[in-house]
Image (spheres, rainbow, N blue to C red):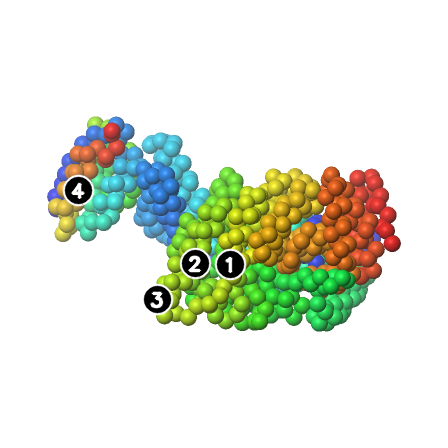
Amino acid sequence: MAEGARQDNLLRGLPVSMGYAVGRVRFVHRKSWSATERTITEDRVPYELALFEKAHARSLRELEMLGSQISRNVGSRDARIFKTHVQILQDPKITEEVPNLVRTKLITAERAVYEVTHELSLFFERHVGGDKARDIDDIADRLMGHLNEEAGALDAPVLDEPCIVVAHTLTPSLLAGADTGKILGIATDTGGATSHVAILARSLQIPAVAALNRISLDAKDGDLMILDGFEGVAIVDPTEEEQALYAERGRRHRERQRDLAKQSGAERPVTLDGKYIPMLANVELPEETSRALEQGAEGVGLLRSEFLFFRAGAPTEEEQFQAYREALESAYPRPVTIRTVDTGGDKLLKNLSLSDEPNPVMGWRSIRVCLDNPAMFKEQLRALLRAGVYGRLKIMFPMVASLDELRGAKKMLDEVRLSLEDEGVRVADSVEVGAMVEVPSAVLQMEDLAREVDFVSIGTNDLIQFTLAVDRSNEKVKELFQPHHPAVLRMIRMTCNAAHEAGIVVSVCGEMASDVLSIVLLVGLGVDELSMSPSRIAENKSFLRTISYAEARETVTECLALRSAREIDELLYRRFAKRIEALGGTSYQAKLRKFRDAAALRGESAPEPEA
Amino acid sequence: MITRVLQVTNKLGIHARPAGMIVEITTHAQSDVQICYGDSRANAKSILNVMMLAAEPGSEIKFVINGPDEERVAEELEKLFANRFYEDG
């Protein structure tokens, strides 16, 4: 291929999950009803009908839940509107007419829903009144949304052979439904480092590049592609030289990872002066536990249980029990911290949460959803307590913002324990209970909270976004999302001081725990444990072994005297760049390069590293 | 089979909420229930049908009820209309 054409095939985006991948493109798309094909062949009819049935059931469940919630909180008069929507949804004009159209006109369920509701909406608009038309539109939107979501889950690509998944946008449900073992890499037009798909990719150790803008247009099914999850580069149809180059890089990276894991599997994460900082793994799916331990994790510091809920439909108590048991057994005697369902924000768990809130991140999510849905929440707690028999279980409640919420959750846990005991079911004797620290109010009230839990774990992603009022999914303000902002460091320090005063352990399970320079700060601030993507443990263990606790504390004292995240970053770079460089890890190199690039972009040069 | 002619006496006519209340009665009935307004006649178990009639205040609606529990259904509908769908005051 001509040299001049090369640039067209090389796209730059955001590196969101490290690693190299070379493979054939598999294009995956979510259907969107406005753009979707409208006609289907006869053999697709049962699929479309099943899709409609599921979406319809989900919409109903959602409306009923909303209705009961509103009637509890606001009054039954206001809940009436949801009741009307339930009735409309169950109207034969929808439940019979949509499947009818699918069968007779051979169109997709989405198209059929569109045709039926559009006609109704027009009728109401013309003959009855605009507000009724809006009721219909609202129901149509809800149905369409769930159709899309179901199509996402059901359309989870069947991957016959290893491939690089390319998509405009990927949803967690789509990824959770696929055979992730066959995914060599992920390249998307949209997304960022903290999107849920990125987190999942890191956890599954699949290289991923996001924000490529037009990769879904440039790459076709079956194209050969190179994906560089360190630099954030995707090369479509690479030259032989490029293939050879990346084959070599990949080989070196794998070798190094293997060496590191071998080394650090045996090594303990201790500082030069003997301070032991356990490093645990963040995982999404219980079956990832054993692999994480092989990579040197000293347990699971965060199991994001909501991923069980992303798979087709909500799991039963028994399914949850089996999953938690698997994680606990494979980690034993090491601990497993399981976080109860944490939905909302960018995670948008459609069957539990609502997507149309004006401000979902501060809306009905996490522990709030759980406390409002005691049946669902208790089912999870039952499964947890039953599974606790098989290992060292720690239960963690997310997004705690007040003592009432913590007490409410603990009360339910007690109730569940009592009723299990009444039933004669074996439950774990001692289960540690903790709270996540993600909301500034929890930090400010840490003295009170710490007295009522066995441990706390700081979720840095949310704590940063709530402290700095920066929406981390908004590309326009992402530069303002500064983990090393002096206010964030003070938040962490307050948490550590108050928690230690009460004699409990502080861990960090957010993205900061896996960042090499942040680790210096966290350790120096007094954090006792770190939990991170398993792939980062080996490198970070070896880094920890090059610093001393005294030095980390000193660095923190200096950093807290500085006035901005930039100054703090520069100090960290000056002091640690040489040591990081000497360790030679691929991610370290990328990190240092990124720092220098950012400085260059501002027209400055990076500070001179100290020897 | 029995019929009932009922007058819409609430202020706003048969909008979504009253329609929902009618359908709550009809969908729980074993009887077949038809609703007639002007020239239209429709299945009264469909909230959309009932809403689409857009029966105005002061107008009359005829129900045609046919089945084992037709008397009870007629009674419940009468009560609902007599109480103006419990919405005024």
SS for callout 1: strand
Whole-Å distance between the Cαs marked 1 and 3? Answer: 22 Å
Marks 3 and 2: same chain?
Answer: yes
Residue A213 location, x and y as percent?
67, 47
Q: Residues within 10 Å of mark 2 (few under 14, many from 20)?
A: many
Q: Which residue is mark 1?
A: A433
Marks 1 and 2: same chain?
Answer: yes
Q: Is residue A381 left or right of residue A296?
A: left
Residue A206 location, x and y as percent?
65, 61
Q: Which residue is mark 3?
A: A422
Foreground disc of the pair 4, 3 = 3
**In the rendered structure, which amino acid carries the disc numbered 1?**
Val
Viewer-closest of A135 and A497: A497
Q: Quadrant of residue A207?
A: bottom right
Residue A300 at least partly seen: yes
**In the rendered structure, which amino acid carries the disc numbered 3?**
Asp
Marks 2 and 4: same chain?
Answer: no
Q: Which residue is mark 2?
A: A413
**In the rendered structure, which amino acid carries the disc numbered 4?**
Glu
Residue sitting at 14 percent across and 46 percent down?
B72
Foreground disc of the pair 2, 4 = 2
Q: Is residue B8 left or right of residue A441?
A: left
**In the rendered structure, which amino acid carries the disc numbered 2?**
Leu
Give residue B76's mark.
4
SS for callout 4: helix
Whole-Å distance between the Cαs marked 3 and 2? Answer: 14 Å
